[in-house]
C-alpha cells in the first residue's frame, strides 16, 4: 500500500524558534498533500492544501506567514512553524493524494510538536 | 459546505458486543464517504469508503458501513468487537473543494 512518512516524529523547540516538518510519499507521486492539526481528543483540522509547484491554499483562520508550506517535489512537502509559541504545540499530520481523480488520501504517522 | 457529525463521543463495549457508530453528513451533491481508524499511537488508516454502487460497504477487519441517502447517514457497524478494536474512529466526507472533512471522532473502548 501507499506509504507516507513524516520526519521528525517528535520535536521539542523553544519559543521563538522555527521548526520544519517533512512529509514524504515513499512509493507514489503526490500531486497534492494536506496538512492537518490534531488537538488532544479532537478531530483533525485541515490547515492547508499543498499542490506541487504552486502556493499552498490555507484554510480560514490559519496564518500563512506562521505556517509556511513548501511542496518542492511530487514526493515532498514541508511545513515550517515559524516563531513558535507554546500554543502551537500539537500533533501535525500530513496526507498525500496520488492524483486528481483519486479521492483517497494516505496519512503520515504524525509529528508531535512541543514548544517550551 | 459539506460537514460530518459524529454524535457518539465515547463508546464503551464489552468484547463480543455489536457495534454501531453514528455518522451523519450534510448534503452537497455527490457524496463520497469514509471511515478512518486511529489505533493508539498509530497513524490514521482507511477502514472503508463509499463512492457509488452498493450502499452496504465492507471494509477491513470485519467492519461495514451502510450509506442511507434518505437519512444522510453512513453508520459504521461490526457484529462482534474485539479488544483490539479499541481506537478512535473518524467519519469523513470528500468535499466539493477536493478536501476530506473529518467528523469529531468517536473513541471506542473495549472491555476485555
Image: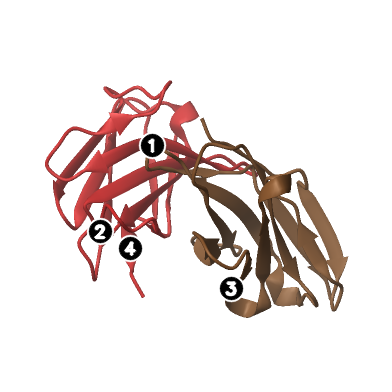
Give me the chain letter of mark 3: B
Q: Which mark is residue B97?
A: 1
Q: Earlier in the sequence, mark 4 or mark 2?
A: 4
Labels 2 and 1 positioned on one and the same chain: no
Quarter of the view holding residue A27: bottom left
Q: Which mark is residue A24?
A: 2
Labels 1 and 4 positioned on one and the same chain: no
Q: Colour of chain B?
A: brown
Pick whichever, A42 or B92, lies toward us.
B92
Quarter of the view holding residue B67: bottom right
Q: Earlier in the sequence, mark 3 or mark 1?
A: 3
Spatial distance from mark 3 to mark 1, Cα to Cα?
A: 26 Å
Q: Residue, x 76% and y 75% (percent of image)?
A: B83
Q: Colour of chain A?
A: red
Q: Which residue is mark 4?
A: A4
Q: Which mark is residue B39?
A: none
Q: Position of residue A74 (x, y in %)?
A: 16, 55
Labels 3 and 1 positioned on one and the same chain: yes
Quadrant position of the C terminus of chain B in the picture: bottom right
Give me the chain letter of mark 2: A
The answer to whether residue A35 is above or below residue B36 is above
- Give the left or right position of residue B28, taking residue A35 as reference: right
Q: Are marks 4 and 2 in contact (CB under 8 Å)?
A: yes
Spatial distance from mark 3 to mark 2, Cα to Cα?
A: 26 Å
Q: Are marks 1 and 4 in contact (CB under 8 Å)?
A: no
Mark 4 or mark 3: which is in front?
3
Mark 1 or mark 4: which is in front?
1
Q: Position of residue B38 (x, y in %)?
A: 57, 61
The crowding category of the residue bearing disc 4, from other C-alpha atoms within 10 Å (few below 14, some 14 to 19, many at least 20), is many
Specify whether residue B42 is in view: no
Q: Which mark is residue B59?
A: 3
Amino acid at each position: 500500500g501507499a506509504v507516507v512518512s513524516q520526519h521528525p516524529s517528535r520535536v521539542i523547540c523553544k519559543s521563538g524558534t522555527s521548526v520544519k516538518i517533512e512529509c514524504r510519499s515513499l512509493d507514489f507521486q503526490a500531486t497534492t498533500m494536506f496538512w492537518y492539526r490534531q488537538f488532544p481528543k479532537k478531530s483533525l483540522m485541515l490547515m492547508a492544501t499543498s499542490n506541487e509547484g504552486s502556493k499552498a491554499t490555507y484554510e480560514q483562520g490559519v496564518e500563512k506567514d506562521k505556517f509556511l508550506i513548501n511542496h518542492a517535489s511530487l514526493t515532498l512537502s514541508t511545513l515550517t512553524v515559524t516563531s513558535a509559541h507554546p500554543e502551537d504545540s500539537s500533533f501535525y499530520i500530513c496526507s498525500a493524494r496520488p492524483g486528481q481523480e483519486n479521492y483517497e488520501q494516505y496519512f503520515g504517522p504524525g509529528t508531535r510538536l512541543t514548544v517550551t | 459546505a459539506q460537514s460530518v457529525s459524529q454524535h457518539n463521543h465515547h463508546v464503551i463495549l464489552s468484547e463480543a458486543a455489536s457495534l454501531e457508530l453514528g455518522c451523519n453528513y450534510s448534503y452537497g451533491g455527490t457524496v463520497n464517504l469514509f471511515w478512518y481508524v486511529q489505533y493508539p499511537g498509530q497513524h490514521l488508516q482507511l477502514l472503508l469508503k463509499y463512492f457509488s454502487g452498493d450502499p452496504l460497504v465492507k471494509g477491513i477487519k470485519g467492519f461495514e458501513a451502510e450509506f442511507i441517502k434518505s437519512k444522510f447517514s453512513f453508520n459504521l457497524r461490526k457484529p462482534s468487537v474485539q479488544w483490539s478494536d479499541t481506537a478512535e474512529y473518524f467519519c469523513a466526507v470528500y468535499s466539493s473543494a477536493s478536501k476530506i472533512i473529518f467528523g469529531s471522532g468517536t473513541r471506542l473502548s473495549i472491555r476485555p
